[in-house]
Amino acid sequence: MDSFFQNAGLDMGLYLGYLLLLAAIIVALAFPILDSIKNPKEIAKSGISFVGLIVLFLLSYLLAGGELTAKYEALGVTTEFSSKMIGAGLTMFYFVLVIAIVGMIYSEISKALK
């Protein structure tokens, strides 16, 4: 009988956790949308950033190689498309990393010169 109540408590705790996770997801999606409705200029800035990321990904995809080697096949990469997508993801990561580092350096230098 004790294990029944322990399992019931565990189930109730899991369901409460799922409910709180769902509430957090809804709030995390709702507040930015409501804020964007109040300030439509922010939507344009977000759109420009999104388009920039798409362009950066396309550039990364064009630069990525699609070759398959025995090592890639041993790791589970079986198609040229998969290889090219992995290469594009890595190339985009490197681009974003360099952009972030340059942005931090620029920010610190511009603060120091003010």
Image (cartoon, rainbow, N blue to C red):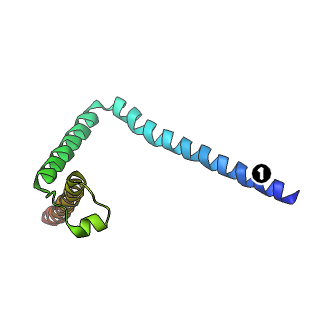
Determine which quarter of the picture holds residue 45.
top left
Relative to 18, does residue 78 appear above or below in the rendering? below
Residue at the image position 89 percent from the left and 56 percent from the top: 1
SS for dot 1 = helix
Mark 1: which amino acid? Ala
Where, by quadrant of the figure, is residue 55 drawn?
Answer: top left
Q: Is residue 109 above or below residue 41?
A: below
Q: Is residue 112 left or right of residue 30?
A: left
**53 vs 7, nearest the viewer:** 7
Q: Position of residue 17 (x, y in %)?
A: 62, 50
Residue on which disc 1 sits: 8
Left-right relation of 101 to 28: left
Is residue 86 rendered to the left or right of residue 31?
left
Q: Residue furthest bottom?
A: 71
Q: Position of residue 79 (x, y in %)?
A: 24, 54
Image location (x, y in percent) of residue 110: 14, 61
Q: Quadrant of the C terminus?
A: bottom left
Q: Between residues 84 and 41, which one lies in front from this camera angle?
A: 84
Q: Residue at x 60, y 47 (%)?
A: 18
In the foreground, 64 or 111: 64
Query: Residue 84: percent from the left, percent from the top?
Result: 19, 55
